[in-house]
Image (spheres, grey):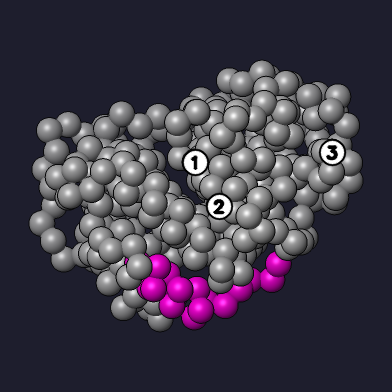
Amino acid sequence: MKENIVAISVSDGPDLQLFGFLPQHLRRLFASLAAATLRNGWRVGYGGDLRRDGFTRSLLSDMGAAFGRGEIGGEPQAAVVHFFSQSSWREMPAQAILNHLTDKELGPLDAPIAPVVETRFLMPALDMSSSAKDDGVLGIVVRDGELRSTEHGERLEESRFFSLLESAAVDRMEPGQALTAMRREMAACCPLRIQFSGKIDGYAGERPGLMEEAIEQIRAGGIVMPLGAFGGAAREIAIALRLLDAKRTRYPKYGRNYHESFEQLEGLARDHQRQAEEFWPNLVEAAWLGTPHRIVFNLNAILAQMGQPARISG
């Protein structure tokens, strides 16, 4: 079921500087897109791990700081939905995950995230009672320092939370399988996915992350908004989907299944254009622009045309 969530994808591409940008430009654009999404009444969806210097922590910190300034908050739903793949969360001690969710290990410059984040743990489908959906997703929010299930709103004891993670970690999915499961779940939930930069080689899954996301998004009937001006996999996606009429960059090395993934996207281009027909001018303009304010302008226009799916309590 589609929800009021816009997925945003970014990773460090190999040619960012070639196109005139630095990593800090990606982070600023990320923050601008997230802010625009929230201003339009949507939520931000992101799938990632919790590396200290990663984009996930950057997003959560920015949103926590915005809450602290009174810029967001008060809504019935969390501003950010963090989709947490099994291959990422199972590598962390359960207590460390709990501390992250409940803001118990904040650094001196860290903003609290508990008020603004819903975390969805992707896990093999198990008998998780009423605490998780049948498709193997355990949704958690923190309210007044307590864990609560987003499915029914009931309080989740810490011991029960630990038990669920322990049980789900026994059935260890391979990293590629876990990432694919997360991307399919996001495609099922998010009507729109924005992508920029992105790895060409060295990715963890069986296919390039951004390309697999785009493939799953289109197959699920959703819209892909690749920002090609920043190079990387997103530029390749824009070309494959006929949003960007430009010569492809030739990279010295490609990761596994890269060329097959590009060809799959080319084969899905017509389906995507049909699904995105009413947004096509905005998607085309966003595909070649490198100026954040114009990218945000086109995002605003797309979200205004889309309206909002029925909200799901959480």
Q: Position of residue 157 (x, y in %)?
A: 88, 32
Q: Is residue 267 above or below residue 143?
A: below
Question: Label 3, label 1: how many angstroms apart (C-alpha)?
Answer: 24 Å
The quadrant the C terminus occupies is: bottom right
Q: Specify whether residue 299 is painted magenta.
A: yes
Which region is colored magenta?
295-312
Q: Is residue 115 above or below residue 243?
A: above
Contact, mark 2 vs mark 3 (Cβ under 8 Å) = no
Q: Specify whether residue 139 is painted magenta.
A: no
Q: Which mark is residue 58?
A: 1
Left or right, 91 with reference to 192 = right
Instruction: Looking at the image, tell me whether mark 2 or mark 1 is earlier in sequence order.
Output: 2
Instruction: Looking at the image, tell me whether mark 2 or mark 3 is earlier in sequence order.
Output: 2
Q: Position of residue 249 (x, y in %)?
A: 13, 47
Instruction: Looking at the image, tell me whether mark 3 or mark 1 is earlier in sequence order.
Output: 1
Contact, mark 3 vs mark 1 (Cβ under 8 Å) = no
Q: What type is the residue that disc 2 sits on?
A: Gly
Q: Which residue is mark 3?
A: 146
Q: Characterize the local packing of mark 1: few (<14), some (14-19) or many (20 or more) Cα atoms within 10 angstroms.
A: some
Question: Label 2, label 1: how many angstroms apart (C-alpha)?
Answer: 14 Å
Q: Main secondary structure of the magenta part?
A: helix
Q: Position of residue 82 (x, y in %)?
A: 60, 44
Q: Which residue is mark 2?
A: 45
